[in-house]
Amino acid sequence: MIRLGAGRLNRIVAVGAHCDDIAIGAGGTLLTLCRAHPGLRVDALVLSGGGSEREQEERAALAAFCPGADLGLTMHKLPDGRLPAHWDEAKGTVEELRATTEPDLVLAPRTDDAHQDHRGLAKLMTTAFRDHLVLGYEIVKWDGDLGRPAAYQPLAPEIAEEKVRLLQEHYPSQQHRPWYDREAFLGLARIRGIESNARYAEAFAVTKLTLDLGE
């Protein structure tokens, strides 16, 4: 298996349609990156949950998932499940983010995610961040939309365990959901680890990737 790195990372962008999307889809990758690159700037954007108890959960969670990072989190109040009806507002928030940052890496939902909010945000990201490496994270759900990822970030066993612990600790509002448990999160990480010759991993879709093999 070929392993490609992105070199020194100074700034990344992480976006989610809902609170906990970023942590579920890329929490292990965030832990890995922030520990490998102390002082990393993380510009996070969440489109819904602003002003609610979920915002408090999200702020505490992302602070834990980004240890030692320079974290900036912007929360908005778009209604859950209604992003297509609020397209202009969502597009405006993404464009505002783009105007303030030049990231080395972007973590976002997948463009083929079955949830309309995830899918809509993903499409906005690949348009706004045209010249950036955008990795589309996956979120297991009832729709059964998991596919064949193009990229993997192996997770050390202690990172995978910490991800699960932080998810359970920081999102009490989600504990009642039947899919929100240790088996689901660690099980998917184990499967993606098998696919990438690792114990655990997070997997990502890549819409477009430009190579520079001559350097």
Image (cartoon, helix red, strand yellow):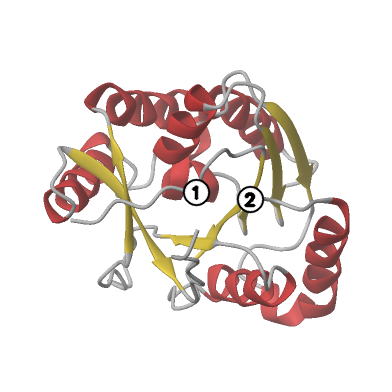
Give left or right: position of 92 versus 118.
Answer: right
Residue holding disc 1: 6
Residue sitting nearer the eye, 169 or 9? 9
Q: What residue appears at the point 21 percent right and 39 percent down from the top-left corner?
A: 200
- Above/below status of 108 relative to 164: below
Q: Is residue 175 visible?
A: no
Residue holding disc 2: 104
Give left or right: position of 179 versus 130.
Answer: left
Q: What residue appears at the point 25 percent right and 35 percent down from the top-left corner?
A: 182
Q: How many marks?
A: 2
Q: Residues within 10 Å of mark 2 (few under 14, many from 20)?
A: some
| Residue 206 percent across, percent down from the top left | 44, 69
Q: Marks 1 and 2: CB-CB under 8 Å? A: yes
Q: Quadrant of residue 123?
A: bottom right
Spatial CA distance of label 1 from label 2 is 8 Å
Q: Please tell me which of labels 1 and 2 falls first in the chain.
A: 1
Query: Is the N terminus in the top left, top right, bottom left or bottom right quadrant?
Result: bottom left
Three-letter amino acid code of the residue under disc 2 = Asp
Q: Residues within 10 Å of mark 1 (few under 14, many from 20)?
A: few
Three-letter amino acid code of the residue under disc 1 = Ala
